[in-house]
Image: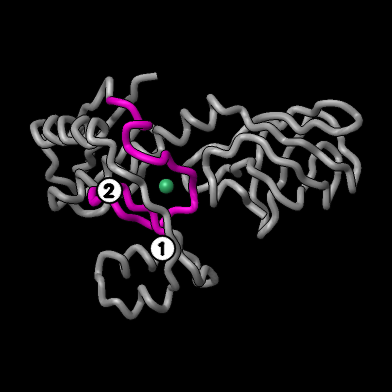
């Protein structure tokens, strides 16, 4: 059971090993976020009666979440897990910033981005100008200062399909067919998207930008680079 989906600020939990192999375990519950959706995995430790084991990487395989370790833990062991909060927080803040910037740029009438990660958004084709990006940066800082709430909720695929909302339906086409319930993340009224990642509770937690610039790449591609305060 992924505990991070309901509470992205939960740092510790108790679980039981339900699958064990050389240097990996699957637990009955976990707050370790697996590498997915452009957001890197958590790191941390699992404590059990045999000692403390470091979690170096976490990956989702099918419905199971694999924790890759520096030592083995036996099947059935009870563990106390602790994620490395500075790593989670830094990833979550940058990922949430990505959502907010995406929403603010979409409001300018730009087509959807073609790629993004925790430090850049790519558009192709794009009419974005450096002046617009500067204005987006000011708006971003206003939204951060205004501490807009982040709202996470679920909607059935059928309902979204029937809504007639062309924006949501076009996003829906990128989600695998088997996913029947979509997780929607709204950042105030500024950004709304499907996402299974971890996010801040409100925009003040994101922090301010220390860098925002537009790179004009080849073939009409434009790349918005951003950096947050530490
Ligand atoms: Zn997200």
Residue 37 place in picture, x, y as percent: 48, 48
Drawn side of residue 109 relative to residue 46, left or right: left
Q: Residue at x 13, y 53 (%)?
A: 109
User: Could you say whether the residue bearing mark 2 is in a helix, strand or loop?
Assistant: loop
Residues rendered magenta in the picture: 184-208
Drawn side of residue 21 relative to residue 28, left or right: right
Q: Which of the two discs, 1 and 2, labels the residue nearer the N terminus?
A: 1
Residue 152 place in picture, x, y as percent: 42, 54
User: Could you say whether the residue bearing mark 1 is in a helix, strand or loop?
Assistant: loop
Residue 116 found in image quarter: top left
Picture layout, residue 182 above or below residue 21? below
Mark 2, other Cα within 10 Å: few <14 / some 14–19 / many ≥20: some
Q: CA distance from mark 1 to mark 2?
A: 24 Å
Picture layout, residue 181 above or below residue 9? below
Q: Residue at x 89, y 48 (%)?
A: 76
Q: Residue at x 61, y 35 (%)?
A: 11
Quadrant where the N terminus is found in the figure: bottom right
| Residue 188, numbered circle | 2
For the residues labelled 1 and 2, say whether their Cβ atoms are less than 8 Å apart. no
- Decide whether residue 205 is among the magenta residues: yes
Q: Nearer the viewer, residue 11 or 120?
A: 11
Mark 1, other Cα within 10 Å: few <14 / some 14–19 / many ≥20: few
Q: What residue is pinned by disc 1?
A: 174
Residue 84 found in image quarter: top right
Residue 48 found in image quarter: top right
Q: Residue at x 76, y 52 (%)?
A: 28
| Residue 224, numbered circle | none
- Decide whether residue 34 is among the magenta residues: no
The label nearer to you, 1 versus 2, is 2
Residue 83 place in picture, x, y as percent: 64, 32
């Amino acid at each position: 059971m992924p505990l991070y989906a309901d509470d992205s600020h939960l740092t510790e939990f108790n679980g039981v090993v339900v699958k064990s192999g050389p240097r990996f375990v699957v637990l009955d519950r976990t707050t370790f976020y697996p590498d997915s959706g452009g957001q890197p995995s958590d790191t941390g430790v699992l404590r059990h009666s045999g000692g403390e084991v470091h979690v170096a990487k976490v990956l989702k395989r099918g419905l199971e979440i694999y924790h890759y370790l520096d030592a083995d833990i036996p099947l059935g062991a009870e563990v106390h897990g602790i994620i490395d909060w500075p790593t989670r927080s830094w990833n979550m803040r940058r990922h949430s910033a990505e959502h907010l910037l995406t929403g603010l740029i979409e409001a300018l009438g730009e087509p959807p981005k073609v790629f993004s990660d925790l430090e850049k958004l790519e558009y192709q084709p794009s009419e974005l100008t450096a002046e617009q990006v500067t204005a987006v940066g000011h708006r971003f800082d206003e939204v951060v200062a205004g501490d807009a709430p982040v709202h996470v909720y679920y909607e059935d695929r059928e309902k979204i399909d029937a809504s007639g909302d062309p924006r949501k339906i076009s996003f829906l086409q990128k989600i695998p067919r088997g996913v029947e319930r979509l997780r929607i993340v709204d950042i105030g009224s500024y950004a709304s998207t499907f996402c299974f990642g971890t996010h801040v509770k409100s925009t003040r937690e994101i922090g301010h930008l220390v860098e925002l610039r537009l790179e004009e790449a080849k073939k009409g591609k434009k790349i918005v680079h951003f950096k947050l305060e530490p």
